Structures are given as C-alpha cells and as structure tokens.
Image (cartoon, rainbow, N blue to C red):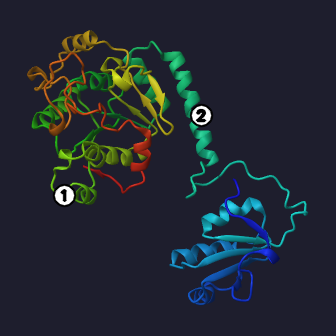
Amino acid sequence: MRNDLAFALADQAPGNDNATLEVTGAMPFADVFRLAMGAEELAIRFEKFGDGRGFSLAVMLRERGYKGVLKAVGDLLPDQAGLLRRAGFDRIASDVKPASPRWKRPHFSHAYQPSPNGDEPAWRARTAAARQAKVDELNRRYADASPDEIIAVATREFTGRIATLSSFGTEAAVGLSFLARVAPETPVLFLDTGMHFAQTLDYRNQLVEKLGLQNVITLEPDARELAGADPAGKLFESDTAACCDVRKVRPLARAMVAFDALITGRKRYHGGERSDLQPFEFDGERVKVNPLAALSPKEVTAIFRTLDLPQHPMAAQGYPSIGCWPCTAPAEGDGTRDGRWAGQDRTECGIFDPSLVERAARTRSYRLI
C-alpha cells in the first residue's frame, strides 16, 4: 500500500495549534460528534499504534455528515496512510521520529481490501492469476476438442458457478442443443430487453420445449434505471450504446455476480473481435467458454439438419443475426453479423466488454422472472 497522505512530524504539522480541536479514540462518539459539528478542523489522537478506535471515529463522523478537515495525530507510521485515507482523514501528523527503526519498516506492497483509491486487493490479483493459469491450461488441453467435450469440461471445472447466455437468435439452437445433451441443468440466461421481435420470444418458447431446457432465467432491465435513462422508450434513436447499456449490459452484469464462468455461442467466423476466439478466455474477472468457436457455417448448417433443429422464423427473411428490433435489419452481405447496427461503427452490444461489465456490476440488483 503506497503513501497517499503526506506524513509530518506532530510539531510541524499544518493546523496543529490551539485552534484545532483534539479528541482521542477513547472518547464516546456522542461527545466527539458534538465537538466536531462546530469545528472546521478536528484532530483524532492515536495514543497507541494498535488502537483502531480512531479509525472508527473518523468513519462514523464522515458517515454522519462531517465535512471539515480530519487530522490523524499520534503513534502513526507511513504504512497506515492508505487506511487512514479510506477512513476519511485529510492529514496525518506522526509522533514517531523518522530516525526511529519503526519508521523504516517496509511499506505494504499490496492492498488487502477494496478501497476508493482503486488499489487492487491482493486476493483479487491472486484470483485473477489463478483463473488465467487455468484458462491457459484448458486451452492447451482442449484447443481442438468438440463442443460437447468443451461444455462437459467447463461445467465440471465450474460446477454450480457457470451459466450460458443465449439470445435465442438464428444460431442459438446449436449451442443450446449441445448444452441440453451434456448439462441440461445449467442456467440459461436470456436478456429480455423489452425490444425483441415477437418471433424471437415465440422461438425461445419453442426451443425450451423441444430441447427440454430445465433452467431458463429471464433478465430484465431495472425498472427505475430504465425510467431514468429511457423514459420514452426511444433512446435507441439517439444513443444505441446507452440503450444497450441499460437494457443488456447492466442486467447481465448484475446477474453474473453469481457466476464465475459464462458459456457463449460466439464463433470465429462472426469476424471482428471474435476472429481469434479460443475455447476458453479470461476477461480479468470471469471465464468465458466458447464451445462453438471453431465451427464453420457449413458445420452449423449440418447440425441444424442432423438434429432436426427448428430455424428462427426470421432467418428465411434475410436476417443472419437477430437482436432488438430497432438495431436489426436484413442483410445482403455474407457477414453473419451484417444487419446489426447497420450504418454504425459498432458490431457488439457491450455484454462481452469487461470494463463495461465491471462498472455495471456495481449498480442495483437485477430481477429474476
């Protein structure tokens, strides 16, 4: 943990004069609060290094609205700077002389709890390293594995903490058919944005019944967020990215708090960001499993035929990829993602962007229908 508040000797600290009220960690909070409300600057004395009551006083004062300057004084060392900042202190003045051996103790190199200053906790760094190592090993072992085998491995590795994501679009039946055969109890997350074609909703119901999917979970946008961001239901006309954010990214991100891994239906032939997909990938937070990554368009067509899978009713009308109706159009080109956000410089809705997902996960809880 790096110093992020300046240390000064107590007899040199700015504001250390008779105008600054000083309290100790031993004082009852009610008395401290009464004094603080009339003070522009308050010093909290740490009489012993191991006494944490000063931290508690600072936090409670800030939570109850104290806006003045908080100064920590007393038996303090540089390694406490980050913790003091998190507790709400603005200044630090230590009684410990820099010549003291205690002052020269090495700084902590890692944070151990989440904090407002953005330091990554050590446990999160260790978790990320372990997941990346696991993904590297899985790709080494299963780079050429079949979709069935990849799904079986993934559901075994992440038992109880894995779900699959499906748009119930033109190619959805392929991935769902493998899942139904290998691990039918796996949760299937469906983002009901409120702007799907009626044909997509009918197709979803048809596939659920035909494949015997046991655990389909529908995620909807948060009603209050939606009312604030898109009260007229026309946000797509001015900002399609913001529309996707409130209707797709945020609901999925909050749902994914319960999972460590997500099975997708993405394929390399979709192009763009998907061209180099591996069976397993790590986005810094969760593992994404892409069992269909290596399939070709001909193989997808063959699976539909062999397994007698129903086609999305709009596929025959020239829609190679189907999402929400405002951002989906028939396409004349050969690209599988053609027709999505036509005329715009985007090919993805954002649900696979880890930076957007991380931000969205901190917003309010999702609804399970």
Crowd class of label 1 (few under 14; some 14 to 19; many from 20; radius 10 Å): few
Q: Nearer the viewer, residue 173 or 171?
A: 171
Q: What amino acid does circle 1 point to?
A: Pro
Q: Secondary structure at mark 1?
A: loop
| Residue that appears at 53% across and 27% down | 135
Q: Is residue 255 above or below residue 337?
A: below
Q: Quadrant of residue 60?
A: bottom right
Mark in the foreground, 1 or 2:
1
Residue 110 in picture, x, y percent from top left: 68, 48
Residue 166 in picture, x, y percent from top left: 28, 33
Q: Is residue 132 visible?
A: yes
Q: Quadrant of residue 273?
A: top left
Q: Secondary structure at mark 2?
A: helix
Residue 190 in picture, x, y percent from top left: 26, 39
Label pair 1/2, CB-CB below 8 angstroms: no
Crowd class of label 2 (few under 14; some 14 to 19; many from 20; radius 10 Å): few
Q: Is residue 182 visible?
A: no
The residue pinned by badge 2 equals 130
Indicate left or right for 231 with 364 as reference: left
Indicate left or right for 122 with 345 as reference: right
| Residue that appears at 25% across and 9% down | 298
Q: Is residue 59 above or below residue 238?
A: below
Indicate left or right for 227 with 2 as reference: left
Q: CA distance from mark 1 to mark 2?
A: 43 Å
The residue pinned by badge 1 equals 231
